[in-house]
Image: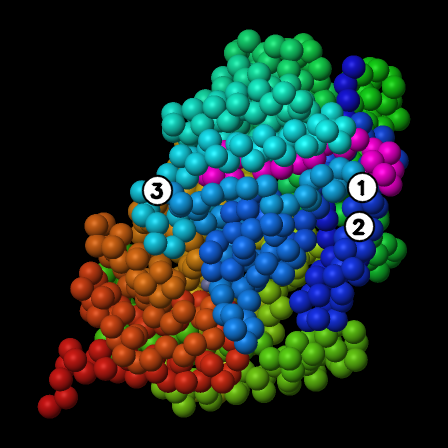
Amino acid sequence: MALSNVSGFPRIGRNRELKFATEGYWRGQTSAEELAATAKAIRVENWKLMQDAGIDLIPSNDFSYYDQVLDTIALVGAVPERYGWEGGEVDLDTYFAMARGRQTDDQDVTAMEMTKWFDTNYHYLVPELGPDTTFSLSGSKPFDEHAEAMEELGIDTIPVLIGPVSFLLLSKPAEGVSERFEAVDLIEPLIEVYGEVIEKLAEQGATWVQLDEPCFVEDRSEKELDALRLAYEELSKVRERPRILVKTYFDHVGDAYGVLRDLPIEGVGLDFTGFIHEEGSGFGDAPFHEHGGRRNAEFIANQEGLGDKWLFAGIVDGRNVWRNHLEHSLDALDGLNSHTEQLIVSTSCSLLHVPIDLEAEPSGVDADLDDEMRSWMAFAVQKVGEVVTLAKGTAEGREAIADQLDANDRVRDSRRLSDRTSNKEVRARLESLDEEHDRRNSPFEERKQAQRGIDIPELFPSTTIGSYPQTDEIRQTRMKLKKGEIDWAAYKEAMQSDIEKVIRFQEDVGLDVLVHGEPERNDMVQYFGEQMEGYVFTENAWVQSYGSRYVRPPIIFGDVLRPSQMTVDWITYAQSLTEKPVKGMLTGPVTMLEWSFVRDDQPLADTCRQLALAIRDEVEDLEKAGVQIIQVDEPAIREGLPLRKDRWDEYLGWAVHCFRLATSVARDETQIQTHMCYSDFGDILEQIQAMDADVNLIEAARSRMELLHDWERTGYRNDIGPGVYDIHSPRIPSTEEMVELLHEAARVLRPEQIWVNPDCGLKTRTWAEVDPSLRNMVQAAKQMREELVPAS
Ligand code: GLN
Ligand code: ZN
């Protein structure tokens, strides 16, 4: 026997209904009842879809108005004090206040912090806990949704909850609580509440409950493993309870395997993506995206198996858009089957991270996603089908799914042999690269001398990160071009006039190194992806990034090639307007990779190297066109770090290499700048140095120059612009406060190293904010210069 299960389904609605309903509610245009009705319709549609497809164990409580961690905060009553909640059921407005902050006549509270969900591009709300936090059952969402599915469709769903230990580990100390506070110390009072939850679920007839403990795919201490043990030993003692399934995803469980194996629970869920069973063949023998699937399989094989527990095998990848390799998966599942009493075929994680339905993409001759390319892909709906097929194949043998296996073979062949996925020229070029290729001609000190020809002040030069306010007018012009309402010439003229405005503004403010302002860019990855071969874009493939913000990540399907120049005309136009240097502005290879769906048929490093070559060619062309400074942004470099530390070196090795490959073509006289932001850079300082950019413009104001303490320890040899203006806030920083930040920087760094700049691009700000802020910033730079060289 083998049953089928899905860990969670996208909850945004096929036509983004949830976004429009929640945003309508926030604006006061949609009533609470209308919002609830929209939400219910989405849930019912999802359940019905999985029921019709033949999924045996269907999830509930995977729906959320905003975020599943926020749902848990509400469920256990961990509402921070500032929201003025007085116990009882957490109401919708308190819930949204935690998500978005609340500004009314008598209340002005900030939102809870949002941060990345493991190594995905989804963001969750961070629980704020402290020694005084108390928990109480304060919501009915899991019960209501289980009852709703029963009532509407007669399905006994598996309610999905964030597990108690991961909930604690995902938290941060509440305001005023010491950094030394350990949230796992709260495990006992928290399991009391979880005990109540599962007891109630049993009362209303739930057979199973799924508790997600993804934190155990990261390196964990003995104490944390003990908390895991304790939590589930206690929960298993609840007298009337459903069967307990503990699920993990995104990597292997490491030392937690032994704990899970020995716990008195009924099911364990592990991620097996990247695992190819010994007999497997096909796309090559190595698992390219090792999310730890192989390790999980080894635990099962070598550490006594799971006894009589049910194994939920996450074999259909919930993080990519490609069809499953059914033959490989069946091999893997057969291997696992011999070590477990009951095998459940499942997705590797919630399908929340992939778009809903391939069928929603326009088809036909004009479509970007043509029939062939479409046949290679699977979104959430298609993945549900794959789960069912694999369960059937495992239960009844391969003959039972012969047709599907056949079709699967054909599409894989079509993809593998396609001349669209592979480009000989690109491959030959990568082969021919030698060690010198990722190295600049001379060391930084010599390059700095060579760059003296560029007209910038020697001390505290000022610049910005690239984008200027993206006004409604700019967006509308872009829409008009897309819809064919205006032609390219009219579009170009509109953009050039914006560029001129941005140049004149910067001259007037007195900035030293100018930018063109990026008006022509819809998005820093999409803009370049659209001009490269190997990328495809979708119309409706929305994925939740956070709350009501959804994105359509581009898809890299084939070898990446830059057929022609991407930015040179815009930059040279901007340069033609001014005597001051205008810098070229590119997105780096690692960021291009991180913010796209990547191909699964070659190692990530290879895809990244192709991107690096494409950017390298643009760097070379900009230089030939006379551009003296080129910025290559890598805001996502820290995000790509694997969850397990033992794989960090490997990742960082190729990530740094790719940045260098993209930039090392520049002559000594050309200045390479980079920009990074909104990540914890403390653990990759050495690699940031190794990237060897001439100037690194790095976010620092928001964290009050915390980064400088790190540099204090290790030093930084090249030039650096620690951001002095927090662009996430509408407030206008004063000259004094920026001078103060620069003084702090000058205590750690040599004054000759320091640049003056904001934390990040300005595209989300208004002109009314940017204008005075930048004037103050330039003034701060001047003041620093005068202090060092007092005017005589
Ligand atoms: N150059 C980009 C901009 O200024 C960088 C954006 C980013 O770091 N995310 O908008
Ligand atoms: Zn940035």
Secondary structure category for the residue under label 1 = helix
Relative to 459, does residue 390 appear above or below in the rendering?
Answer: above
Q: Position of residue 38 (x, y in %)?
A: 80, 56
Which coloring applies here?
Answer: rainbow
Q: Position of residue 652 (x, y in %)?
A: 41, 42
Indicate the amino acid at tag 1.
Answer: Glu
Q: Amino acid at mark 2?
A: Lys
Kind of residue indicated by mark 3: Phe
Number of residues whose C-alpha sits closer than 10 Å to that of mark 2, classed few (under 14), some (14–19) or many (20 or more): some
User: In this view of the protein, which residue sits in the foreground, 618 or 752?
Assistant: 752
Is 205 covered by the magenta stretch? no
Mark whose residue sits in front, 1 or 2: 1
Is residue 388 placed above or below 476 in the rendered structure? above
**Residue 568 in the figure: left or right of residue 181:** right
Mark 3 — residue?
Answer: 181
The tag earlier along the polypeptide, 2 or 3, is 2
Instruction: Name the outermost residue toward the left.
Output: 792
Pointer 1 residue: 148
Name the residue at 77% across, 53% down. 39
Sequence-wise, which precedes: disc 3 or disc 1?
A: 1
> Does residue 415 show up?
no
In percent of the image, x 40 and y 45: which residue is there?
132
Judged from the image, the secondary structure of the residue bearing numbered disc 2 is helix
Residue 40: give its label: 2
